[in-house]
Amino acid sequence: MKDESTVVKKSSLPQKVQELTDKGIVVLELLGEDGQKYYFRKPGRQDLNRYLAGVQKQKLARATTDLVYDILVHPSREELERMFDDKPARMLALNNAIQTEIGLNEDFDVKKL
Protein backbone atom coordinates (compact mmCIF):
# COMPACT_ATOMS: atom_id res chain seq x y z
CA MET A 1 0.00 0.00 0.00
CA LYS A 2 1.36 3.41 -0.99
CA ASP A 3 1.66 6.23 1.47
CA GLU A 4 -0.99 8.85 0.58
CA SER A 5 1.37 11.77 1.18
CA THR A 6 3.78 10.33 -1.41
CA VAL A 7 0.98 9.94 -3.95
CA VAL A 8 -0.24 13.51 -3.42
CA LYS A 9 3.26 14.92 -3.60
CA LYS A 10 4.13 12.97 -6.74
CA SER A 11 0.92 13.96 -8.50
CA SER A 12 1.51 17.62 -7.68
CA LEU A 13 4.89 17.62 -9.44
CA PRO A 14 5.24 19.23 -12.87
CA GLN A 15 4.72 16.66 -15.63
CA LYS A 16 8.32 16.83 -16.86
CA VAL A 17 9.61 16.15 -13.33
CA GLN A 18 7.25 13.23 -12.87
CA GLU A 19 8.31 11.72 -16.21
CA LEU A 20 11.98 11.80 -15.20
CA THR A 21 11.39 10.36 -11.73
CA ASP A 22 9.27 7.59 -13.26
CA LYS A 23 12.33 6.69 -15.39
CA GLY A 24 14.44 6.48 -12.24
CA ILE A 25 16.28 9.75 -12.84
CA VAL A 26 17.06 11.68 -9.67
CA VAL A 27 15.52 15.16 -9.70
CA LEU A 28 16.45 17.78 -7.14
CA GLU A 29 13.82 20.19 -5.84
CA LEU A 30 15.18 23.53 -4.70
CA LEU A 31 12.85 25.79 -2.74
CA GLY A 32 13.65 29.49 -2.86
CA GLU A 33 13.09 31.95 -0.04
CA ASP A 34 10.14 33.32 -2.00
CA GLY A 35 8.49 29.88 -2.14
CA GLN A 36 9.39 29.32 -5.80
CA LYS A 37 10.29 25.70 -6.60
CA TYR A 38 13.01 24.81 -9.07
CA TYR A 39 13.68 21.30 -10.37
CA PHE A 40 17.00 20.06 -11.71
CA ARG A 41 18.25 16.71 -12.87
CA LYS A 42 20.97 15.64 -10.47
CA PRO A 43 24.24 16.33 -12.28
CA GLY A 44 26.52 13.41 -13.01
CA ARG A 45 30.24 13.12 -13.65
CA GLN A 46 29.89 14.27 -17.26
CA ASP A 47 28.07 17.44 -16.17
CA LEU A 48 30.68 18.09 -13.50
CA ASN A 49 33.54 17.53 -15.95
CA ARG A 50 32.01 20.03 -18.39
CA TYR A 51 31.58 22.55 -15.56
CA LEU A 52 35.17 22.12 -14.35
CA ALA A 53 36.50 22.42 -17.91
CA GLY A 54 34.73 25.78 -18.20
CA VAL A 55 36.12 26.92 -14.86
CA GLN A 56 39.61 25.84 -15.92
CA LYS A 57 39.30 28.06 -19.00
CA GLN A 58 38.61 30.93 -16.57
CA LYS A 59 35.02 31.23 -17.71
CA LEU A 60 33.30 30.73 -14.35
CA ALA A 61 30.16 32.72 -15.18
CA ARG A 62 29.64 30.81 -18.43
CA ALA A 63 30.35 27.44 -16.78
CA THR A 64 27.85 28.23 -14.02
CA THR A 65 25.17 29.31 -16.47
CA ASP A 66 25.72 26.28 -18.69
CA LEU A 67 25.48 23.86 -15.76
CA VAL A 68 22.25 25.36 -14.46
CA TYR A 69 20.57 25.41 -17.88
CA ASP A 70 21.87 21.96 -18.91
CA ILE A 71 20.27 20.20 -15.95
CA LEU A 72 17.17 22.41 -15.62
CA VAL A 73 13.89 20.49 -15.65
CA HIS A 74 11.33 23.06 -14.46
CA PRO A 75 10.56 25.95 -14.90
CA SER A 76 11.51 26.43 -18.53
CA ARG A 77 14.71 28.17 -19.52
CA GLU A 78 12.72 31.20 -20.71
CA GLU A 79 10.90 31.50 -17.38
CA LEU A 80 14.17 31.21 -15.49
CA GLU A 81 15.78 33.89 -17.67
CA ARG A 82 12.90 36.26 -16.86
CA MET A 83 13.39 35.55 -13.15
CA PHE A 84 17.08 36.38 -13.51
CA ASP A 85 16.17 39.77 -15.01
CA ASP A 86 14.78 40.69 -11.59
CA LYS A 87 17.42 38.90 -9.49
CA PRO A 88 20.49 38.09 -11.62
CA ALA A 89 22.51 36.65 -8.72
CA ARG A 90 19.88 33.92 -8.24
CA MET A 91 21.82 31.94 -10.88
CA LEU A 92 24.75 31.73 -8.46
CA ALA A 93 22.52 30.73 -5.56
CA LEU A 94 20.95 27.91 -7.58
CA ASN A 95 24.37 26.74 -8.73
CA ASN A 96 25.67 26.80 -5.17
CA ALA A 97 22.77 24.65 -3.93
CA ILE A 98 23.33 22.16 -6.76
CA GLN A 99 27.06 21.99 -6.07
CA THR A 100 26.40 21.39 -2.39
CA GLU A 101 24.11 18.47 -3.23
CA ILE A 102 26.78 16.72 -5.31
CA GLY A 103 29.56 17.33 -2.79
CA LEU A 104 31.49 20.11 -4.52
CA ASN A 105 31.04 22.52 -1.61
CA GLU A 106 31.51 19.91 1.09
CA ASP A 107 33.56 21.02 4.08
CA PHE A 108 36.11 18.79 5.78
CA ASP A 109 37.93 19.19 9.05
CA VAL A 110 41.66 18.80 8.47
CA LYS A 111 44.15 17.71 11.07
CA LYS A 112 47.90 17.38 10.63
CA LEU A 113 49.23 14.12 11.99
Image: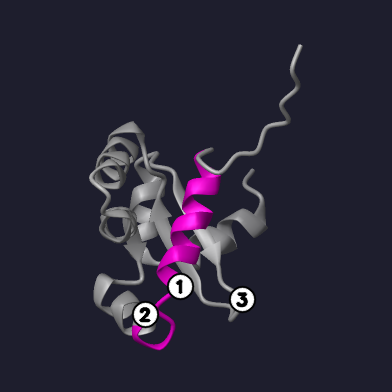
Which residue does the numbered mark 1 point to in the structure image? 90
Task: Give the foreground label among 3 and 2.
Answer: 2
Tell me the element at label 3.
Answer: loop
- Verify whether residue 28 appears in magenta: no
Q: CB under 8 Å between callouts 1 and 3?
A: no
Magenta stretch bounds: 85-102
Q: Residues within 10 Å of mark 2 (few under 14, many from 20)?
A: few
Q: Residue at x 44, y 82 (%)?
A: 87
Q: How far apart, in angstroms, are the residues tagged by discs 3 and 2?
A: 15 Å
Residue 88 in the image, given as x and y percentages of width and height: 39, 78
Tell me the element at label 2.
Answer: helix
Q: Tell me if I can see residue 26 in this picture.
A: yes
Q: Which mark is residue 33?
A: 3
Please state which amino acid type lies under the numbered disc 3. Glu
Main SS class of the magenta portion in the image: helix
Please state which amino acid type lies under the numbered disc 1. Arg
Q: Tell me if I can see residue 13 in this picture.
A: no
- Verify whether residue 92 appears in magenta: yes
Q: Residue at x 31, y 46 (%)?
A: 55
Q: Seen in the image, is 70 located left or right of residue 105?
A: left
- Of 19 and 42, the residue lying toward us: 42
Which residue does the numbered mark 2 point to in the structure image? 84
